[in-house]
Image: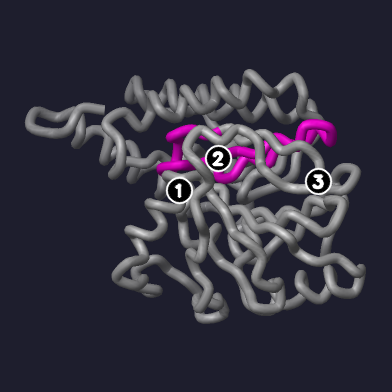
Amino acid sequence: MLTQVAEGVLVHESEFCQSNAVVVQGARGVLLIDAGVLDAELVCLANDLIDSGQTVVLGFSTHPHWDHLLWHPGLGAPPRWGTALCADTARERLSHGIDSRRFGIPDEVPLDLLGGIAGLPVDTVQLPWDGPAVRIVEHRAHAPGHAALLIEDRGVLVAGDMLSDVLIPLLDLGGTTDPIGDYLDALQLLESVAGDVDVVIPGHGSVGGADQVRIRIDRDRAYLDALRDARDPSDPRIGPSAAEGWEWVSDVHAGQRERLAERSAPGGTAG
């Protein structure tokens, strides 16, 4: 079911990790950001759009992780884009196929159109389409070529896998020498546009209002500062206060802390 969160901006929430697909209405069709995950839900989304007389004219993937690279034939065959680095990374990672078991991909996920995205020209800052102005805020947090999208005259920030109320910052521990620094830089970029944001949509978790944008930025920054200083973070997303069904996030935190300790040990890779 599509839920309107701002004028011309709707969200379809998946049962899988509370993933958010975002529909932005344009003059001649819709932009679909991070289309969704489970087959039945993608079919439902496609039918909802058809029933409302809307056609998908453009797809966009915020970053090159499998759950943000999916598509369904019912959505049509419009151009599907990501940043240049996102598209290159997705193509490289999928060049030898994908191991569903290793990545914990449910059987209900359609993989036939996985990763069929093209890269926008390097340094593109505005999404070229016939609809509301969409600013691309590219950074290196979480994954190479990650982009948040600011739908400027709607006051909506589509954050990709950042600014979640249930997920801690997930670091790109295998692809960068300074994952915490990259993430802090990204938060600074998002903070620079926060004054224009009335609605924040994370890749996973609850949609937040204007009051939530800075709260989530500050919470993520505090988590990263504690992680960098090898302190136990006081964060409601981990430990006993974690949301029901999200208890596993505490294990992710423990894994990140362990890997960062290994990187900083003698003989490890600094970061």
Provide residue 254's location: percent of width, then percent of height: 36, 43
Sequence-wise first label, 2 or 1: 1
Disc 1 to disc 3, how far (Cα)? 23 Å
The C terminus appears in which quarter of the rendering? Answer: top left
Q: Residue at x 88, y 48 (%)?
A: 8
Residue 239 in sight: no
Give amino acid for label 3. Answer: Gly
Q: Which element type, helix, strand or loop, lies under badge 1?
A: helix
Badge 1: few (under 14), some or many (20 or more) residues near its Cα, within 10 Å? many
Q: What residue does disc 3 label?
A: 131
Of badges 2 and 3, the one in the foreground is: 3
Q: What residue does disc 1 label?
A: 86
Range shown magenta: 138-161
How did the renderer colour the structure?
one colour
Q: What residue does disc 2 label?
A: 147
Sequence-wise first label, 2 or 3: 3
Q: Is residue 151 magenta?
A: yes
| Horizontal relation, residue 25 to residue 67: left or right | right
Provide residue 68's location: percent of width, then percent of height: 55, 58
Give amino acid for label 2. Answer: Ala
Asked if the residues shown at circle 2 and circle 1 are in contact, with their CB atoms under 8 angstroms apart, the answer is: yes
Which label belongs to residue 111? none
Q: Which element type, helix, strand or loop, lies under badge 2?
A: strand
Disc 2 to disc 1, how far (Cα)? 9 Å
